[in-house]
Image: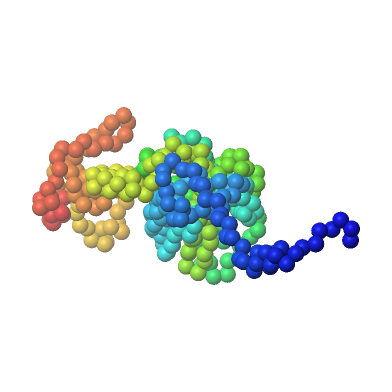
Amino acid sequence: MAGTEVLNQSDIDALLNAASEPAPAMEAPPTQIFSRARRDREKVEICPYDFKRPERISKDQMRALEMLHETFARNFGASLSGFLRTIVEVRVSSATQMTYQEFISGLPNPTSFNLVRCPPLEGQICLEVSPLVLYPIIDRLLGGSNKELFVPQRPMTLIETKLLQKILVRGMAALSEAWAGIRKIDFSLGEMESNPQLVQIVPPNEVVVVIGFEVKLTNRAGSMALCIPYNAIEPLIEDLSAQSWFVTGKNHGEGGTAERIAGGLSGARVELDATLATTTISLAELRALEVGDLIVTSRPATSPAVLGVEGKAKFLAQIGQFRGNRALRIDRAVSPTERIDLGSGSGQ
């Protein structure tokens, strides 16, 4: 070919030597990680981040929320066990972050979707109770055995709603008690809905924390979920670290155990009775009693009445009248070893 240069032997040898030599290794550019604190690049763990599901709560704070609601689960289970007269077990099954739309789309319809007010926090949270555990509880309250219970796929009736409110009110009390270590929050039951798609407490893409529970009732089991929007607990987010939660709970337990027990017992109702005198009569005299007959005792009419609490004599009181009603004015307390003669020949 005209104009083509011909390689001599030295050029050919140079090309063969260059082809036989290994290619030089190319050094990869160093990985650059920008952070406020200096870290070893080899020990840094890089995880994928999904911008559709931003995690705004740290893992420590999620663990604190999970442990906090484990306390709620124990208290709620104990309260239900005493109310239903059967063993009810409630435990935390999961604690995750997701968007509100993801939470709503995973719920059945119909279900029990209940809004919960939480002053002084802004906004609302919601509590969802599965019909698989809801109807066995209602059946238990109405005297059933849950052996051949059919779970209907329909919205709840008015009677069923009223019975459910009695259960959820106990849950609100247990929830307030569990959160008392962080801040005093008065949880109260709000509106109730059967279709969760009709309730929107936050925008669909808002981050929420969903605490899942498993409820076991004898031969029945179901789920329960507590949805807490991030904007509702944002003022408390710094207090939800595991360390501060443990310290707060410990201090609260050491200094306020007696006060909490006294506060819980102070609302208990007791039965009072006032006894003027006692005596004995024969069965024949009892059968012969008529209207207008007088029963005479050996106790003077001026003696004070004995005021008893749950059948135990506690006070001596004078009988009188106050604003048109019969009344008792307490004179003094009765000591545990004191014997009181009520006229029947035996002391009390």
Which residue is drawn at the image coordinates 61% and 50% (left, top)? 102
Which residue is drawn at the image coordinates 26% and 51% (left, top)? 310
Which residue ends up furthest to the top in the rendered image?
323
The answer to whether 288 appears left or right of 62 in the picture is left
- Using the rendered image of the protein, determine whether residue 310 is visible from the camera's viewpoint: yes
Locate the N terminus by quadrant.
bottom right
Image-quadrant location for residue 326? top left
Residue 270: image location, x then y, percent: 30, 48
Residue 261: image location, x then y, percent: 27, 48
Looking at the image, is 143 positioned above or below residue 272?
A: below
Residue 325: image location, x then y, percent: 31, 34
Looking at the image, is 234 positioned above or below residue 95?
A: above
The answer to whether 43 appears left or right of 245 in the picture is right
Which residue is drawn at the image coordinates 62% and 54% (left, top)? 106
- Using the rendered image of the protein, determine whether residue 83 is visible from the camera's viewpoint: no
Q: Pick the residue in front: 299 or 158.
A: 158
Which residue ends up furthest to the right in the rendered image?
2
Q: Pick the residue in front: 157 or 342.
A: 157
Image-quadrant location for residue 2? bottom right
Q: How is the image coloured?
A: rainbow
Q: Pick the residue in front: 98 or 260.
A: 98
